[in-house]
Image (cartoon, rainbow, N blue to C red):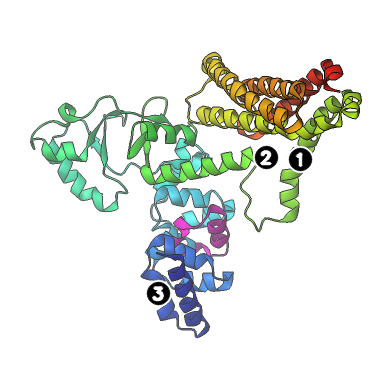
Amino acid sequence: MRMTDIDTLLEELRKALINDDWKSAVDLVEALRPPDQAELFNELPEALQDALLERLNPEDSADIMEELDDEDAAELAQRMDSDELARILNKMEPDEAADLLGDIPTAQVNRALLSIEDAAEILPLLEYHDDSAGGLMTSADVVLRQDITARQALEHLRTVAPDAETVYYLFVVDDDVRLVGVVSLRELVLCPPEKPIQTVMDHDAITILVEADQEEAARLMARYDLLALPVVDAQNHLLGVITHDDLVEVLEVEATEDIYRLGGVTQDQPVDTGIGTTLRSRVPWLVLNLGTAMISAFVLSIFRDTIAQFAILAVFFPIVAGVSGSAGTQTLTVTVRGMALGLVELRDGLSTLFREGIIGLSNGIVIGAIVALVALVWQSNPILGLVVGAATFLNLICAGVAGVLVPLGMSVLKIDPALASPVLVTTITDTFGYFFYLGFATLTLVYLL
């Protein structure tokens, strides 16, 4: 649906609500797809949200709650009474319901659980952190015993499928509910009816431990192109399953976190976040950035006499530091992304460093030569061109090395590489750039004048 359509529907919805035409308002919302319902709903004032939600059928209310941001859904839930909340939670997927309950006060959770029909499915999910595989999983509705036939499996599937979120893969367990294999729906349908499941299933199922981070789950599902990933404990008991729709949400969340961290912001901050909260998040990193900038300023102060004697040197400061800073950011981005995806680990440090060092050397030769030529033509001073080119050449090599060593070093120190590395890489390229440039200028000052 186009944005213009949403705007038109929103205007129609507001008119219906102003006229107390609740039937038209409900019909309008219930005719939309869940993402559009949530977007329309989120534009309404709180009082109208509450009044509209209690008039919608439970399925649509549940869809809206699932589509809203976690914070908005939690605020909405806290304004409901226990019966209304339970009415909606009954229609939500167990993992979505558990996530919502984990964001509201305990007293309200306890009251709601008393009225929830599937509380037994939701309670185990509340034990795990939201960012873990356990917090991401939902109940494994379709589970097969290893001693049944394909015919019996299909009969079982017909019984439970209406309430199952996904039946792409059917998980096979033993008498102790340990995962022993997986069979696809296609294989089950095509195999002879009396064939035992044990002879059809894949015995080497890809699994993830319940305590694992959600990023690891996302990497596994993307790597092996899975639509569902079984979650197990240390004894390989099947606890639940992560579905592909949860994978999309994880990738979005993790990508957003990395973008904010690369910008020096520690958390996702909406534009309407309070000024105090925003300042507490951003000021410490600005202070750190100020401290590192003072290092570059100190290097400049060492060579103040050289700058005073040949002021034109200041013209090329942005080139020497800026080009290298961009190169360092490129290398840093590639390295941090590789670490996030599990493609770059500590054991890969030397090979990654060698690769980026060669790239830095190549960049230095090309960019250094161009900068030297520009300085020569612009200022008609071959020595100045040599100084600027040599400094840029060396600093580009430093940028490539720093873009690898800094995030790997942060990882060793248990500091988030995406959060701390940008400031340090920028400091290194600025400081070394000024040092190389002004150091060469000082050594050749007699020829520059």
The location of residue 73, given as percent across then percent down, is 53, 58
Of 187 and 405, which appears nearest the observer?
A: 405
Q: Residues within 10 Å of mark 1 (few under 14, many from 20)?
A: some
What's under tag 1, amino acid-wise? Leu
Q: Which tag is nearer the camera, tag 3 or tag 1?
A: 1
Mark 3 and mark 2 lie on one chain; the one further toward the N terminus is 3
The secondary element bearing badge 2 is classed as loop
- In whole angstroms, how far apart are the C-alphas of marks 3 and 2? 42 Å
Q: Residue furthest bottom?
A: 19
Q: Is residue 438 above or below residue 222?
A: above
Q: Which residue is mark 2?
A: 264
220 is higher (above) or lower (below) than 405: below
Of badges 3 and 2, the one in the foreground is: 2
Q: Secondary structure at mark 3?
A: helix
CB contact under 8 Å: marks 3 and 1: no
Tell which circle, 2 or 1, labels the residue nearer the N-terminal end. Answer: 2
Which residue does the numbered mark 3 point to in the structure image? 28
Give the residue type at disc 2: Gly
Instruction: Report x, y in % for residue 110.
Output: 53, 53
Quarter of the image for residue 435 reads top right
Verify CB contact (< 8 Å) between mark 3 and mark 2: no
**Magenta residues: mostly which secondary structure?**
helix
Check if mark 2's residue and mark 1's residue have beta carbons within 8 Å: yes
Residue occupying the point 30% across, 46% down: 166
Kindly state the secondary structure of the residue where label 1 is placed.
helix
Looking at the rendering, the stretch of residues picked out in magenta corresponds to 64-84
User: The disc labelled 3 sits on which kind of residue?
Assistant: Leu
Residue located beneath label 1 in the image: 286
